[in-house]
Image (spheres, grey):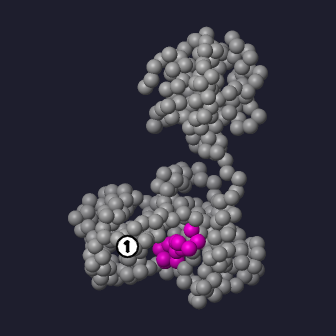
Amino acid sequence: MLLDKKNAETKLEVFLAGLENVKQRQQWYIELANTYNIPVSISSDIISRRKDLSEYNEFILFAITDIIKPEWTSKFFVDKEIKMYSGQKYKPETVSFPIEIPMMQVTEDQYIGVSSAKWLMSLRDAYLINYNADTQRALEIMLKGDTVVYRPFVNEKSVNEIAESFKTRSFIPNTISLNINMDDENADYYFKDNKLVIKSITEFDIFDGYHRYLGMARNYDADHEFDYPIELRITMFSVAKAKQFIWQEDHKTKMRKVDARAYNQNDVGNQVISRLNNDPEFCLANKISLRGGYINSGIANQIIKRLFFNNNPTKKDVINVSKTLKTRINSFVEDYDGYVEREWSRYEIYIIIYGINKGYGNQRIHDALQNITSEQIKVLHNKNEVRKGTIDVVKEVYGDGRE
């Protein structure tokens, strides 16, 4: 494609978001059916934005573009793709039944096993994966004239991060949950010899793991050789039980954002912290952590990234920042040894690391710590995220002025 698939999808969805002409939509359904054999059930879901375009393959994207915005076709696709797709008709990929999946039985209506992204994509291409609005925890509500439309809520930032972690092979496999609808009259399955055998099914409802599913799809659409191991849960839940399961999952103990970020080992701030903790020459080695250390790793991570890194950090940057912090913190606590014997408060982490970043001497950093006002401390302790306002307060402490 000339344009990245996700960018093309976004342009189309923005265009469709402003469309309220019912007759025009119906005309497109007819044209898509006549030209590409695309069923109205699919085209209406896409054009009415009940489903995300990311759920569909490149051919569907081409057909939709060609019918609703033909002038964009040559902007999205290369000539070879245009020639190939123009002659195609919709024909879903087929999955051979019975489907046999090695699994362990958890309860009479719940099974757990191992599968792969490529297998999940084969279900997608056969249109056997359904986003069931009745069992989803997050829906976007849109008004189309007098009609209320429920569609998948997609956090693009989250999908982008997941897709990138799949691409770099850093994603730790977790569970995708598929449900066999109890009202599906075509569903026929049994469990024997640690295998779930599905003889027939209309479709699976994906009710947990939708963003991961989209992240896999982006990688697969870019490279059909892409594959990745996944944990797989298959259930036979009623709508009520599926909702109860989602409620239960949402009530797991949640970490604060500042703590959660400390677990991402692909994060440059955490890489610096890991180097410091593992360096025996660093005076506070193994003392930067979320609990029980002297420096809170979640807070340190944020201020280090904000002050020391740009948008495209390299491994060399991580090494250099680690060396700078090790040398300067060692020097500071050598002059003021009280800081090597106790936990640092949030404002102390901000003040010290900011001073190191600015190249200030130990005396000036210590003076700033002594001269900070109770009001400034209160403001800094109330800020869970390191933003411009946080840095502005720290600058005030040093008398540096505002950004």
**What secondary structure is marked by label 1?**
loop
Along the horizontal axis of the image, is 1 left or right of 258? left
Q: Nearer the viewer, residue 317 or 260?
A: 260
Percent position (x, y) of residue 245? 67, 68
In the rendered view, tell whether residue 108 sits above or below residue 385.
Answer: below
Q: Nearer the viewer, residue 105 or 85?
A: 105
The N terminus sits in image quarter: bottom left
Question: Which residue lies under the disc numbered 1?
Answer: 146
Q: Residue at x 55, y 79 (%)?
A: 203
Percent position (x, y) of residue 17? 35, 64
The image quadrant that residue 115 belongs to is bottom right
Along the horizontal axis of the image, is 68 left or right of 174? left
Along the horizontal axis of the image, is 290 left or right of 26? right
Percent position (x, y) of residue 210? 55, 64
Span shown in magenta = 124-136
Q: Residue at x 49, y 26 (%)?
A: 392
In the rendered view, tell whether residue 175 sits above or below residue 331.
Answer: below
The image quadrant that residue 200 belongs to is bottom right
In the rendered view, tell whether residue 125 sits above or below residue 39.
Answer: above
Residue 132 within the magenta-colored segment of the rendering: yes
Residue occupying the far left of the picture: 71
The C terminus sits in image quarter: top left
Q: How many marks?
A: 1
Residue 70 within the magenta-colored segment of the rendering: no
Residue occupying the far bottom of the picture: 185
Residue 179 visible in the displayed image: yes
Percent position (x, y) of residue 391? 51, 28
